[in-house]
Image: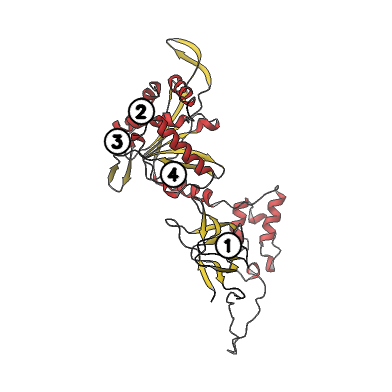
Amino acid sequence: MAFEFHLPDIGEGLAEATIVSWRIPVGGRIGLDEPMVEIETDKAVVEIPAPRAGVILHHGAPEGATIAVEALLVVIGEEGETWSPPLPVAMAASGRGEALPIVGNLEEAAPAAVPAGRPRALPVVRRLAASLGVDLASVRGSGPGGRILRSDVESAARGSGPVERVRLSPTRLAIARNLTRSWQEIPHVTTFGSADPTALLAARTRLAEASPTPLEALLVNAVVPVLGDFAEFNASLDGDHLVVRKYFDIGVAVDTPEGLMVVVVRGADTLDVAGIAAEIVRLAEAARSRTIPAADLRGATFTISNIGAVGGGYGTPIIPHGTTAILSVGRADPKPVVREGAIVVGRELPLSLSYDHRVIDGARGRAFLAAVIAAIAGVTG
């Protein structure tokens, strides 16, 4: 008997996933627990194994399509078995249960009453117009009664210049949701400063001779002791309580083809620079290849974002939800600087600290940044 397998919730709160590739075509045989399909969630690309052995009778969605949790993913049966999806039956007025044809489409359905002077268009067409920047008042509808259709909006958009609608990937959508939530819920304050990177860059050059040493490893090692002295920066706000973390799981922003991901170095205070570096390299490679477990992308207590790696300077970083602060580090380009009362060509490391103003005042924010600047200047590696 054909077995219908529905997409399970393989993560916390997963709502949908995108089909990346089917490993077995319709009609192909598959064994129990053999890789069946590769899907992309908002965190990673995951393989789903076959729940039973048999022949693939049906794919619930083609490659590239998005499918909701609990929707039919695949049908597996026996050799020679057939399966057809149940068809909806429109009951005739006579009650004979005859299947009636579906005539027209949604855009041709009669719309609800439209206020006088308002362009006639279905909500889906209005949303399309908004996304394309088309003023419906300037569009002449070609539908019944002058109603504006999707094709009318698309034609109007083309008249303003070429456009392309690109569906955001699950990862990009997750990033958008998380940043929007942080921005809406956390009152951000950003303070700026600069550090002398001479010792930091020298230590990195020295350590890199033995093994790959991302600059972030030295930054994490320098910042963790400061977090120990400024507990509210290694914390989260829970209702009326500040939850101070007594451990240091430091998030490090990683640039990937799918967007910025924050990987988490667990127990950073228990590792030396070499150990932190090895962990960052491992996590970054897994993030870029989309093989990183979701657990390694959650639970940071403080975050460091090295925007200097992509040419950035100062910025206004958004605080990850569930934390109280984030440090952005820019590129230390040569520039005129003051050293011992003289202007010379040197380097300064741009630092941007965003913090939650509900629990951290400006004076405390400046004190923390000053301590970070001193720690960076005193790096020994």
* Of the image marks 4 and 3, the number of the one nearer the N terminus: 4
Residue found 66% across the figure and 79% down from its top:
101
Is residue 241 found left or right of 65 in the rendered image?
left
Q: Amino acid at mark 3?
A: Ala
Query: What is the distance, in whole Å, between disc 4 and disc 2 at their CAs?
Result: 21 Å
Give 166 or 227, whichever is nearer the viewer.
Answer: 227
Q: Are marks 4 and 2 in contact (CB under 8 Å)?
A: no
Query: What is the distance, in whole Å, between disc 3 and disc 1 at their CAs?
Result: 50 Å
* Of the image marks 1 and 4, the number of the one nearer the N terminus: 1
Label 3 packing within 10 angstroms: few (<14), some (14-19), many (20+): few
Eye-nearest disc, 3 or 1: 3
Identify residue for label 3. Answer: 231
Identify residue for label 4. Answer: 183
Identify residue for label 2. Answer: 366
Eye-nearest disc, 1 or 4: 4
Eye-nearest disc, 4 or 3: 3
Q: Amino acid at mark 4?
A: Trp
- Picture quadrant of residue 241: top left
Eye-nearest disc, 2 or 1: 2
* Of the image marks 2 and 1, the number of the one nearer the N terminus: 1
